[in-house]
Amino acid sequence: MKESKKLMSNTDYHANEALGSSLLKLIHLKSVLHAITKEFTQSEAMAVGSAVHSLVLEPETFTNEYAVSPKCDRRTKIGKAVYADFLADSEGKTVLSEASLYDVKGMATAVMEHPIASRVLTGGRSEYSYFSVDKETGIEKKCRPDYENGGALIDLKSTRDASFEGFAKQMGDLGYLIQAAWYLDVYNEATGEDLKEFFIVAVENFSPYAVAVYKIDEMQIEVGRKQYRKALTEYASFLKDCEEVGEPKAKMLHGYPAEITTIQVPYWFLDQIKGA
């Protein structure tokens, strides 16, 4: 088992080969094939979300990690030269547009001016990395909670819709229950503690940057735990099969079951038809 590493950068954490919740979420939502073949590309929205994390949780690192693109017409020779010099000076940093920086600052301000969000994100510690080994599969696991405070883990998420209904749907669509259960379990295994509470601070990524704070209760944590255990079992079985037959990853996979499956529309759709 490895100790938590405060000085491990986000880049080094993601480069570590231990299993994180992102792969399990994709296995649950799609398949093992989708999870192991997905190529990471950072969108502008993802860059904004990461920048908000930095500005709220580790503001002292923000200027070292982010640079704002200068105003210049890159269609002209002078503009191209200005931008080339900017990129050279900003090597290793994430580039944000002025509009994105405006949103990042607005979101960070909204979070830190919110009476509850500011309280749960103050007085604790951020961006520690934790590692443990799964007893059932032998797979090394990792997690990197956004924030730890008062015996709870807190995740800061940017979103288009932080309303109760909208964010509840997003939790299901994006596998947030898996993330919550995984983070709590890996953290507890790595530290010997028994944390049970997981909160999400959700901030909308457009003006007026509305903020909400949500708690995921123990019943839903258990749902997420069952979801990730099923996904973890599928992944472990896949690794074992690859090892036994000596085939490279993905060659043995079809994504979905290699058989004919009877399909039905969701029950809620049938209810809509009955009520029509």
Image (spheres, rainbow, N blue to C red):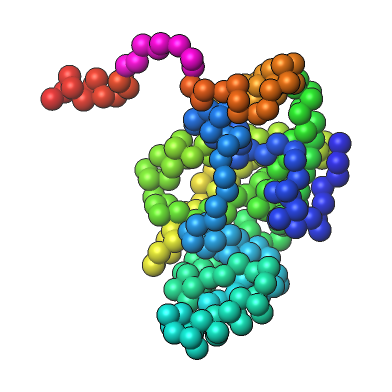
Q: Eyeballing the image, is 84 above or below 94?
A: below
Q: Eyeballing the image, is 138 above or below 101?
A: above
In the shown orientation, is residue 41 left or right of residue 249? left
Q: Nearer the viewer, residue 126 or 45?
A: 45
**89 within the magenta span:** no
Q: Position of residue 144 (x, y in %)?
A: 70, 48
Q: Name the outermost residue toward the bottom.
A: 78
Which quadrant holds the N terminus? top right
Q: Nearer the viewer, residue 267 or 88?
A: 88
Rendered residue at 51%/81% (across/down)? 80
Q: Position of residue 41 (x, y in %)?
A: 55, 52
> Majority secondary structure of the magenta segment?
loop
Does residue 186 appear anywhere in the picture?
Answer: no
Rendered residue at 54%/56% (across/down)? 42
Rendered residue at 44%/37% (across/down)? 173
Total numbered badges shown on the rendered structure:
0
Rendered residue at 54%/43% (across/down)? 215
> Which range is magenta?
257-264
Q: Position of residue 206 (x, y in %)?
A: 40, 64
Does residue 58 appear anywhere in the picture?
Answer: yes
Q: Eyeballing the image, is 248 above or below 56?
A: above
Q: Position of residue 178 (x, y in %)?
A: 58, 34
In the shown orientation, is residue 215 left or right of residue 59? left
Q: Eyeballing the image, is 230 above or below 173?
A: above
Which quadrant holds the C terminus? top left
Picture quarter containing residue 91?
bottom right
Q: Name the outermost residue toward the front.
A: 77
